[in-house]
Image (cartoon, coloured by chain):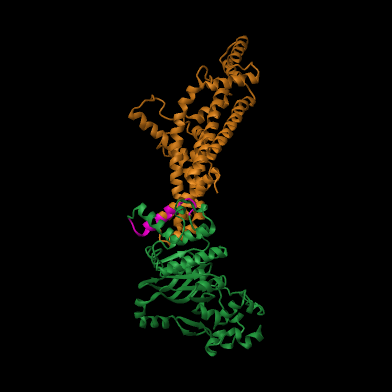
Chain colours: A green, B orange
Amino acid sequence: MSERIVKRNATSDVLTTTDSLLRATGLTAAYTVDGGEVVAVDDVSIDMRRGEVLGVAGESGCGKSTLGAVLSLTLRPPLFVRSGELEVDGRRLDLGPHQKPPRSWRGEVVSLLPQGAMNSLSPTVRIRDFAYDVIRAHQSGVRRDDAIERTRQRLEHLDLPRRVLDYYPHQLSGGMKQRVVTVISTLLNPRLLIADEPTSALDVSSQRVLIEMLKEMLSEEIIGGVIFITHDLPVLNIVADRIAIMYAGQIAEVGTARDIINQPRHPYSAALLSSVLVPEPAMRRTRVQGIPGAPPSLMHPPGGCRFHPRCGLVMDVCRDQAPPKVGDERRFASCWWAEQNPGQNPSQNPSRAREV
Amino acid sequence: MRLRKYLVGKALWYVGALIVALVLNFLLPRLVPGNPVDAIVAQLGRSGAQAEQLKRIHEHYVAEFGLNQPMWAQFFTYVGNLLHFDLGTSFAQSPAKVGDLIAEALPWTLGLQLPAILIGWLVGNGLGALAAFKGGWFDRGAFLSSLFLSSMPYYCLAIILLYLFAVALRMLPPGGGYEPGLMPDWSLLFATDVLRHYWLPFFSLVIIFIGGQAVGMRSMAIYELNSDYVNYGRGLGLPDKRIVRYIFRNAMLPQVTGLALSIGTLVGGALITEIVFSYPGIGSLLFSAISQNDYPVIQAITLIIAIAVLASNFLVEIAYGFVDPRIRAARAGER
């Protein structure tokens, strides 16, 4: 399958120079464990345009944080990239078990906005000194005063108080810490920001402030695009332009946020959405449905379609043959059912209602 | 303002601890069975003096040392003398002043211990941090040998080194601070001789110390390596050396305590090492004083040890505030 994707990329190289921000192909990453490997990201390919926010959603253990670590080049043992290719804003990078990603990419081309900013800052380093360290890691010989002045301007531009520069991390509130970390992550105007659950530890008003800050930075082209990893579908509905639903290390479905939420094609997307409480009057009579079973162990993933043991629309072919990608790179579902029922929403299918 | 209040409060606490130490210093040697005068007189008796004479000498010494006075009166004389920085006269080596005996022995102990502790601390922490950061075979080798060394009593290594280099290989002298025939002066000959006598006790201390520090630093650094800020720093492209510096600063906190406490216990810390190598330091002095019930010398040395431990603890508390802003904030009453 990866071969097919590579070929398609080769023909559409022209697109790269115009509005393509990210083209990731065949990303595969595995944890080495006693007696083998657990493939946490299995041949994932992602396409993104400039200015886009791509939401990545899925249950715990579906590989979304691992995908974030692969894209932000922050994999640590026992996690290794097996293969893959990144192209960010026209710059290419081959990934592999023996390739050491260049330090200059991290923070400048791709940058990480970490999960739970609580401990992301060293407790004994002032914000201004950390900002200086980040800037001088990429611009050797930069003057300390200049680096701090640039950070101060960025803070004020984003309506954050300049006094935080003099603070130690423990002097910042949770929401403020997350915003300061966001400013530091974007100090070098990275082309792609990988935000791994940035809002998960925040209350709703801090979430909103953070999302507005990200959108402002996008519209001013401080950052080129955002990959927003979360398990929080309502947040994705607000922030994401497109959504990728991950299941067991693979992308089950990709599409615009509106398509995924209103017209899901993969039974898993539909099931995930139907397990979310929506506080709207029209939903009052709809039963919230969970997904039966639990995500599979990635040590021994089920054959065929990985979702088949939990799927209400399972067919014989699902049990032993990997599903095809139905659609193109920007809107597809990896599903046999979607192939046989083009354009239909699995949650409105009568056979599903009978099953559950 | 609150910081000053905090410091004054702490200082008072340490003064209180010092007073308790003073009382114990005075009391404990006197609880040891036996009497220093008995020891002196017994020695004289062996040299063939008459019983009547011995009794008179005994009384003379008891009066001279003030041992016929009640305990509390002795205590106040002791404290009164201390206030004049008078440590008294040695019983066993009368009429030598205790202050002179200590002034003679202290440079040997400091010269042996201070470099051993400082070098051991630096090398040990560097080794521990490096082992944690590098991992793999280097880590395993460094960790296992450090663990082995740090769990070995330091006099064991002293005896092993003594046997190996002084007895079996005859490369280095087995003991003493310098050759018995030499007179201490500032000549090159004397300096090289002192150095030759220095290696064995020095290495027996420094190797053990490196092991202990490396084990502690390694586990602290491994804990820090897994923290979020290390991953974030990598994600922002910080160079390894910068990240190691962050790790080192955060992992160092408990190690600073260790350093200060070793400096505090430095005076009495190498007692057995000094005895093994018959090194002319405080340890040897204390050992002979104890065996002779020489109260003033014992008291003076334990007092110095107590003051050193208290002072270094006090300094650690202040130093902590400089290394860790959270502790500084808690002290000043901030959030």
**B53 sits left or right of A216 in the view:** right
| As drawn, B76 above or below A200 | above
Q: Which residues are magenta?
A: A122-140
Residue A223, how many percent across, how many down?
41, 67
Q: Residue at x 45, y 39 (%)?
A: B116
Image height of B46 relative to B3, above or below: above
User: Where's residue B261, x and y in %?
Assistant: 52, 39
Please name the residue shown 61% across and 78% down the image.
Answer: A274
Is residue A24 in view from this perspective?
A: no
Residue A355 among magenta residues:
no
Q: Nearer the viewer, residue A151 or B218?
A: A151
Name the main secondary structure of what is drawn in magenta.
helix
- Number of labels in the image equals 0
**In this view, which residue lies farthest toward the bottom?**
A340
Q: Is residue B7 above or below residue B230?
A: above
Residue nearest the viewer, comparing B167 with A321: A321
Looking at the image, can residue B106 be seen?
yes
User: Going 53% across and 62% down the picture, which residue do you hit?
Assistant: A116
Across and down, in percent, residue B281 comes to 48, 30
Indicate the quadrant where residue B41 lies. Answer: top right
